[in-house]
Image (cartoon, rainbow, N blue to C red):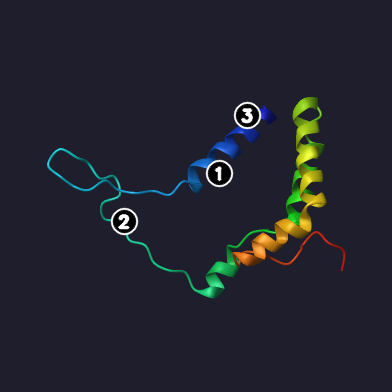
Amino acid sequence: MELKKVIASVAVVAVLSVPAFAAPQSESSFSALQGVDAQALSVAEMQAISGELNAFDIAAALTALAGGLDRFPRLQAATLRLADYYVTNAVQINAAFEKFGVLTPCKSCAP
């Protein structure tokens, strides 16, 4: 059952990260996003929903997730390898996050 949750989580992230668009309207087309308005978020709103975009926090979350995957040793090993990748390349990953303005302070690092 745990594998299904992991796969579902990945699928949800993939769907939510794909930009939505509406086709030009004509007599034979249908627009699913008709009437949807978008607005820019304030800085405070962005900070409140920014998440944990820090390589060390991502690695910590992956390591914690791997702890519950004992029934799936191959998935557990792959998750731990991915966590190790984030730790090994943390400087470059965090530099990219900072470049795009989404780097958050490390929540899993010791003070």
Looking at the image, residue 79 sits to the left or right of residue 100; the answer is: right
Residue 50, given in percent of the width and then of the height, sits at 60, 62
Label 2 sits on what residue type?
Val
Crowding near the residue tagged with mark 1, few <14, some 14–19, many ≥20 C-alpha atoms within 10 Å = few
- State the quadrant of the C terminus: bottom right
Camera-nearest residue between 111 and 100: 100
Give the labeled residue for mark 2. Answer: 36
* Distance between the alpha carbons at the discs numbered 2 and 1: 21 Å
Secondary element at image label 3: helix
Crowding near the residue tagged with mark 2, few <14, some 14–19, many ≥20 C-alpha atoms within 10 Å = few
Q: State whether residue 4 is above or below residue 59.
A: above
Crowding near the residue tagged with mark 3, few <14, some 14–19, many ≥20 C-alpha atoms within 10 Å = few
Secondary element at image label 2: loop
**Would residue 21 be seen by someone viewing this image from the given angle?**
yes
* Distance between the alpha carbons at the discs numbered 1 and 3: 14 Å
Mark 1 vs mark 3: in front: 1
Give the labeled residue for mark 3. Answer: 4
Camera-nearest residue between 109 and 28: 28
Q: Residue at x 62, y 64 (%)?
A: 102
Query: If you read the primary sequence from the N terminus, does the residue marked by circle 1 or circle 3 appear first?
Result: 3
Give the labeled residue for mark 1. Answer: 13
